[in-house]
Amino acid sequence: MSFDLGVLPAHAGVDEAGRGPLVGSVYAAAVILPANYDLPGLTDSKKLSEKKRDQLAIQIKQQATAWSVAAADVSEIHQYNILFATMRAMARAVMNLHTVPSKVWIDGNRIPADLTLSAEAVVKGDLKIAAVSAASILAKTARDAEMYALHQQYPQYGFDRHKGYGTAAHLAALRQFGVLPQHRQDFAPVKALLLQGKCFVEI
């Protein structure tokens, strides 16, 4: 795949994963790629199989000039809102890079307010800019890892399958077993069940 903007020295790409699910943290990643990167199949994480994402995540970490993954947890999502929490995670990912980027490409149409570096929002940046595609993969694989860990604790919810999204299976599990502390309390389906007193009870 060819990218419109290619790779520019010390330019970081940033993307997020997990804004829509009903449970868990929202993740963001920042990546600076070298000009000579070799990542066959690199593209938006949503267009890749889980196996290919996992493979590329390893290769990105090996080849990147710098990379960072950060998150905002459910307490921050509840305290602020999902958009603001996402912006906080993005800013953290950039500030945690061990190389200071000369410019930051942000996927989407917003730039985190507390990001002090030169930055530009690019709609569909994960399809146009290699470093943003790489960031989308690292954010998505980190988010999935949290869901697999949560599945180990609460296998009855099926987090390994739906990854926290509001699928019919997830909503059915919520109604049957109740709301976990890791669920996002202000998201409508979760909030409705909390109002009914549907909380998870450890047996």
Image: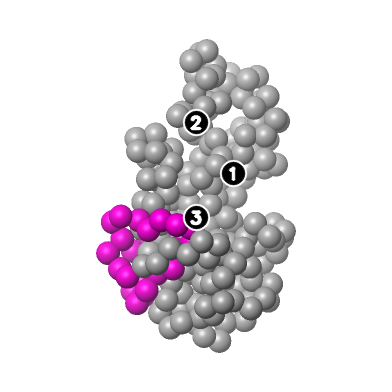
Quickly name the residue at label 2: 187
Query: Which sits in the foreground, 57 or 2?
Result: 2
Quickly name the residue at label 3: 16
Does residue 28 sit above or below 24 in this rendering?
below
Local packing at callout 1 (Cα closer than 10 Å; few below 14, some 14-19, many 20+) is many
Mark with earlier residue (2, 1): 1
Q: Does any portion of residue 155 appear in the rendered image?
A: no
Amino acid bearing label 1: Met
Residue 11 at x, y percent in the picture: 42, 76
**What whole-number distance in Å separates the C-alpha atoms at marks 2 and 1?**
18 Å
Quickly name the residue at label 1: 147
Which residue is drawn at the image coordinates 59% and 56% (left, top)? 141
Where the N terminus falls, by quadrant? Answer: bottom right
Membership of 111 in magenta stretch: yes
Task: Count all numbered tags in the image, as a single digit.
Answer: 3
Instruction: Check disc 2 and report its element: helix, strand or loop.
Output: loop
Amino acid bearing label 2: Phe
Q: Which residues are magenta?
A: 95-118
Query: Which sits in the foreground, 189 or 27?
Result: 189
